[in-house]
Image (spheres, helix red, strand yellow):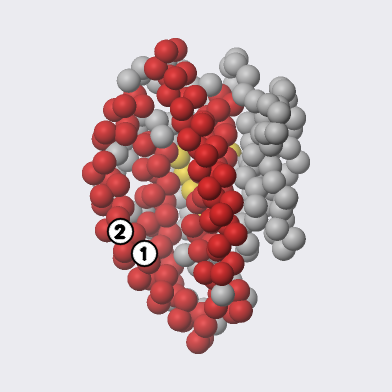
Amino acid sequence: MTTTGEVHAMNDPGSQASGQPASQGGNPPGAAFSAPAGGGGATALQSDSTYPVTCALDAPLEMENLQPVISYFLAIPHLLLLGLYGIVAFVNAIVAWFSIVTGGSPPENARNNIAGFQRYWYRVVIYQYFMTKQYPEFKTVPGYADPGGFPARIDITPATSYDKMQVILRALYAIPLYLYGIYVAIMVFIGLLMGFISVLTGGKWNPQWRRTVFNAVTWIMRVNCWFFLLVDEYPGFTFES
């Protein structure tokens, strides 16, 4: 499914395109994304299924006017806990890296731990970015298929085989992704700023700016899952759903 409010850039030659962009509205000079337009829109968002990591969000556009402030404040303890879980996930990723390089496959418990961390991270980010009012639980949610119970879900199809050379050079392959991530971060900042103004003044997300933030978060989660060795397919240099 294609969406508006997306950023498009040239794909990595080895990656697959996520879909063809739908062009709606005018683009600011020099911009590579569709300018959001007002009006209603579907509240459910779903990423494409061409990549082994898919994200979804089903939450209303309407928010309390102060929800952005509330979300950022209440997300603080989750962010602290995420830091601790992140250390454990990183250690598991190192174990998985050595296992793949020496034996060809990672320990399943290590990947399960990483998947739980990524899902918890996704839920916290969606709440922190005031895209849902439901407060996440203080725990990781392991498993590749999302069990539900939260408006945001992430499903992962783990790799069945790995390109050992790409795994060995993972950090080098990640450099261009993280450089492109600067651009993605700028788009997230703009989207959140516009969302903050929209919710603060009107009690409702602009649907296309929310879509832009969702698309960016989806791309970030895909990069994270690739870097932490849950999947082996290169994420590419575009985010769209």
Residue farthest left in this picture = 77
Residue type, label 1 = Ala
Image coordinates for residue 165, horizontal then vertical, percent: 61, 79
Residue type, label 2 = Tyr
- Counting labels gives 2
Nearer the observer, 64 or 49: 64
Residue identified by numbered label 2: 85
Image coordinates for residue 144, horizontal then vertical, percent: 47, 58
User: Is residue 53 visible to us here?
Assistant: no
Image coordinates for residue 188, horizontal then vertical, percent: 50, 37
Identify whether 93 is placed above or below 234.
below
Mark 2 neighbour density, 10 Å: few (under 14) some (14–19) many (20 or more) = many
Residue farthest front in this picture = 30
Identify whether 102 is placed above or below 92.
below
C-beta proximity under 8 Å, tags 1 and 2: yes
Q: Residue at x 42, y 46 (%)?
A: 122
User: Is residue 189 visible to us here?
Assistant: yes
Quarter of the image for residue 222 reads: bottom right
Nearer the observer, 52 or 82: 82
Residue identified by numbered label 1: 89
